Image: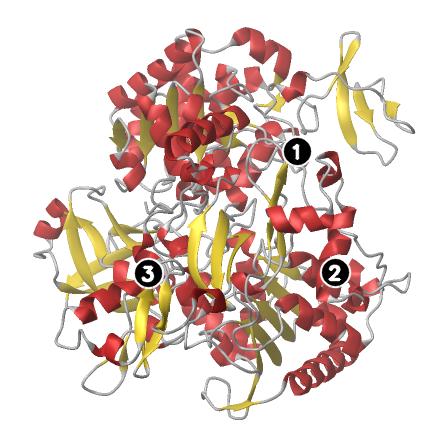
Amino acid sequence: MNTKKNTEEQSFLAEIDGKKFTRRSFLQWTASSLSGAAIASGLVWNERFGLFAEANSKEKELEERWITSCCNMCGGQSGIKVKVVNGRAVKIEGVANPNNVANISTSYDSVVKELGAMYHDNDAASRLCPKGNSGLRTLYDPDRLKSPMVRVGEKGSGKWKAISWDEALTLAADNLQKIKEKYGAESLLWFSEDHSFTHIQQDFCKMYGTPNYHNHANLCDVARKASFKLVMGNERPLPDFENTAYALVFGWNPLGATKWTLLPGIWNRGRAKGAKMVVVDPVCSQTANKADEWVPIRPGTDGAMALALGHVLIKKNLIDKAFIDEWCVGFDEYAQYVADKTPEWAEKITSIPAATSERIATEIGETAKAGKPVTIDVWSGPGQHTNATLGGYAITILSALLGMIDKPGTMMEPDKKGSKHHSLSANLPSLKKPRVDGKGTKYILGHESGIYVETRNAVVEDKYWSPDVTPPKAGMFVFQNFVMSVPNTQKNVEFLQKLEYVVVIDTHMSETAELADLVIPGSVYLERYDFNSHWVTWPVMGMRKPVVKSVIGGMTEVEFIMALMQKMGLKDEKGHCPASFTYDAYYQDEFDACDFPKKCGVNWAAYKEAGVAMFGKTEYEKFRKEVKIPEGGKLDETSGIVKDKDGKDVGFKVGDTLKKGFATPTRKLELCSNLLKKHKHSGLPEYSEAEDHPTTEFPLYLVNFKQAEHTHSRTFNNDYLMEMKPDNPLLMNFATAAKLGLKDGDAIWIESPYGKAKGTVQTTERIHPEVVALQHGYGHWALGKVAKGTLNKLNTWSPAGTADGQFLSGKAEKFSGMAVHKEIGVRVTKA
């Protein structure tokens, strides 16, 4: 991991004889015979300001500012400060924002105090990943779109015409209005990123009248959300690795696929304090490498292992029976179900020796019995399979059996208080039309982010889950490279080609943008505002703000959508429209809707300057907190549930007191789900085999994975990041490669029932012998010169790496609708 002191990845741009240099390349250049050219051209390195300047310039002529903000090179939202000299951003460093340090308030305070005293700088506690350190290369990427582009040829022909922003607004407004009048407002699909300017997009959808809003979360972790929600009602509990005694992690690589930069720190500090760390994963990731034990498992079988662990815990009486009796429901049904789910049963499914499962179950049980904390977590490894929700449910139940919920060193319920939104009142009839994707109906645990592949498949196949669904005719894609991000690349292309009108807002001419009718240049995070409700366990809200003016002289996404609202005359039923605000005033209005910054005594001006607001501390066992019947609320004497005036559950009766409990239908931890029972399911974490498993013809499991060098399919035109990881060879076990007559570096063919492509093989012992793996996001044929790779002898582009999505069937998990990214059988042959 790079720290804030690592300036190798910072941009120090200068113009010398018409050439651009980074500090790294300048040092390399000066070692050559051209070493005197910088001085000859009148430029010298100014150490104070961190850039080249004219030799005779006076320092007072250079205006230096450090501006605090939040990163958005991924969804982690780390705190940053940016050095701006004469209006140009020249350096990024981390700050002591909780997202960079720790997710428990006492741990955060301790680390900042210790390292702050050691280095005389509180920001020494911070860290940034490679993506955060390379942000300036994205900001000043020469391949960024500079102006709106309208298609003048066939879709995908690459024929475009640059137009003005006013022309783009008129075209978008006119065409969206025509779509609405001809097919109905619900025929518009909207896809967005899940943590950037989403409120204004949802407002547009409401006022336009479409219920078909989707966002990126469906491609990420909605199966995990569903699994935890079934048990505890909270979609995203957080692990307290730093203070645990035993961590058991299924299919997550927090040290490599680093979502929050605090993760490596809390993991490594936990190990330093003596915690045992065990990682269950088909691939020996960076996290597994830094654990005490790596347990290689067949992909998609994690749920079977978890059921075997539950079996052993109950058989050996290593459960917390008192906690279960007080705070759980469904134990007897669960215990009966796992009675025959022995480690020997699981071994046949998972390939994990029965003795290993028996030992791990015993270790976590005895650790908990000794009064020491245990953390058990699961993420996208098991969560991106066709059996993800119930497999994850089996894993999340284990913490409940041990009584290891919301205590120090366990899975914590975050106390999330952050940005609120002045929501609009919209009651258009079209908003009541059924969604295209069947969220909440066909997919009973579908997340608010929608179901991408269901929507796409319905359009491609012209088959809809209900006869009342209006076929989609138009699509808006904001900060989303749909073609490269959604499983089954060919279907993605067909989907975009079938839509009558497509608008894409993005920073680059992506594969998705190439199939659009109108492309609008997007902003980079250093040019815009956003609120960030941080994923830690106490209330923290960060703020992203512009540190420089738009490099391309364009509009931000929020400004464009507000202008589009105004152009179309959109208003809610009260006559309100966000377009009545200026850009800055819009965010001040959003800030005024928030309650917790006021509790900190922070006003708008102070919040903008600080870039973060926080109050309080991490609280434990919040489910035991006593509550009162709210004004206008009531106690249902039959169920014992306390409801507020709007009918929302807020607590339940325990003896003579009212407790908060958990946000489940029973207000208790559910080992057998009442919600699933209502939908004619047993309610139990039943194990089922993944649908797209290997076959005789396609005998190897293919999974994908992510690393700290890249975000999804988004960062592949960043030259610094591509220098770190220029391609994605197929990982294969040494023994498997030997059987196939392959050696490290060989050119290969990778083939599934859905796609075939070339790649290279990298042999290793750090992968299950039945599994091969590709890092996600490579294989671009658009986006920019760096992403596309190199020109070959035929004067065509040779992509950097192999796109993993082309091999996948393109399914959605049947409960949550999670896009299935890690499940297919392939064969590999020498090219």
State the image quarter where residue 377 is shown.
top left
Residue type highlighted by circle 2: Tyr
Q: Is residue 673 above or below residue 759?
A: above
Q: Give the tally of numbered discs.
A: 3
Left of 203 or right of it: where is 152? left
Please give the name of the residue rendered at 23% of the width and 41% of the height, measured from the top-left corner: 768
Residue 453 at x, y percent in the picture: 53, 60
- According to the picture, the residue beneath numbered tag 1 turns out to be 675
Q: Nearer the viewer, residue 454 or 233?
A: 233
Q: How is the image coloured?
A: secondary structure
Please give the name of the residue rendered at 41% of the width and 6% of the height, measured from the top-left corner: 370
Contact? badges 2 and 1 (CB < 8 Å):
no
Residue type highlighted by circle 1: Leu
Q: Earlier in the sequence, mark 2 or mark 3?
A: 2
Residue 40 at x, y percent in the picture: 24, 80
Residue 230 in view (yes/no)? yes
| Helix, strand or loop under label 1 | helix
Contact? badges 2 and 3 (CB < 8 Å):
no
Label 3: few (<14), some (14–19) or many (≥20) C-alpha neighbours in 10 Å: many
Left of 299 or right of it: where is 167? right
- According to the picture, the residue beneath numbered tag 2 turns out to be 586
Q: Is residue 533 above or below residue 470?
A: above
Which is closer to the viewer, label 3 or label 1?
3
